[in-house]
Amino acid sequence: MLKKEISAVFIFLILTAVMLFIAAGTAFGVQKFFAKKITAVYKNIKIASDGKYLKAPAEAFILKDKNIVMVPIRTIAEAVGEPVVWDPVSSTIYVGSVVKPEDKTFKSKFDYLENLTVLRNVGDFAVVKSREVRIARVPFSHVVAVNLEPREKAEFVLELWGKYSEIEGYVGIDDITRDSSSVIDLTILKGNEEIQKIEGIAPAEQPKYLKLSIPMGTRNITFRVECRDQGIGDYSKITFALAEIKFYQ
């Protein structure tokens, strides 16, 4: 009798674990994936750079059927001074600059943010050309930025004339103010209608990926930011950056 009870409890626990896994996958929007069997050979492989052994979060191994050594990419990239960014939306790892390779299956005609007509600019958003902008050490080329203090707000309005269908790019805090105590809330509006909001954009965080559909026929769009204090930092001034923002037709 006891053995049957234990078996029943065991089966119940397995079913519960499976249900929790499925529920978690639904709640967190897990993308489709597939499992693939590999033959891994572990030989206590060490990784060294400039005469020093590197600490890796996972042990390197050899793919036996291909004779290829697999190592953690972040460990290697950061050892040579290149940042790594993981984009969960497109399942892409960016090493160095976050510049998306051209996808022939996607719309290729676009305009950068800085090339669009500005109808209103409160807070003096400006195109940064005099220096390289980095967000959490990731370098960007096409950047529009604004400097703010807590309780300050800024916004700009772009004229679109119904030409564009999608926005794609990154937002974050310029590393030049990475020790600031402030954070930024970003709101994107069509007229008075809020169509996107990202709150608590903080210094030293990885660039946040922005992808947004623009309602058909949109004549103009507003980017509005508000600065607030989070209480930890050496100063309050902060530089918010919109990086590689593209408007696809």
Image: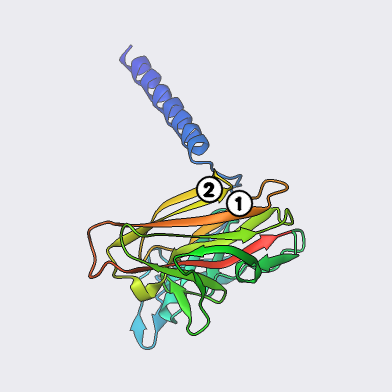
State whether residue 186 is above or below residue 54: above
Q: Nearer the viewer, residue 203 or 197?
A: 197
Q: On the rendered structure, is 11 left or right of 228?
A: right
Secondary element at image label 1: strand
Q: On the rendered structure, is 31 left or right of 47?
A: right
Residue 115, given in percent of the width and then of the height, sits at 65, 71
Residue 70, given in percent of the width and then of the height, sits at 51, 68
Q: Nearer the viewer, residue 120 or 37?
A: 120
For image coordinates 72% across by 46% down, the residue present is 216
Extreme top residue here? Answer: 1
Q: On the rendered structure, is 71 left or right of 166?
A: left
State whether residue 198 is above or below residue 139: above
Q: Nearer the viewer, residue 22 or 190?
A: 190
Q: Is residue 76 visible?
A: no
Secondary element at image label 2: strand
Q: Is residue 241 visible?
A: yes
How packed is label 2: few (under 14 Cα within 10 Å), some, or many (20 or more)?
Answer: some
Quadrant of the drawing holding the N terminus: top left
Quadrant of the drawing holding the C terminus: bottom right
Which label is found at residue 212?
Answer: 1
Label whose residue precedes the other's in the sequence (1 or 2): 2
Which label is found at residue 196?
Answer: 2
Residue type (three-letter) at the residue carrying disc 1: Leu
Residue type (three-letter) at the residue carrying disc 2: Gln
Callout 1 touching callout 2 (CB < 8 Å)? yes
In three-dimensional space, the C-alpha distance between marks 1 and 2, rounded to whole angstroms, equals 8 Å
For image coordinates 27% across by 56% down, the residue present is 230
For image coordinates 41% across by 69% down, the residue present is 136
Q: Nearer the viewer, residue 36 or 52?
A: 52
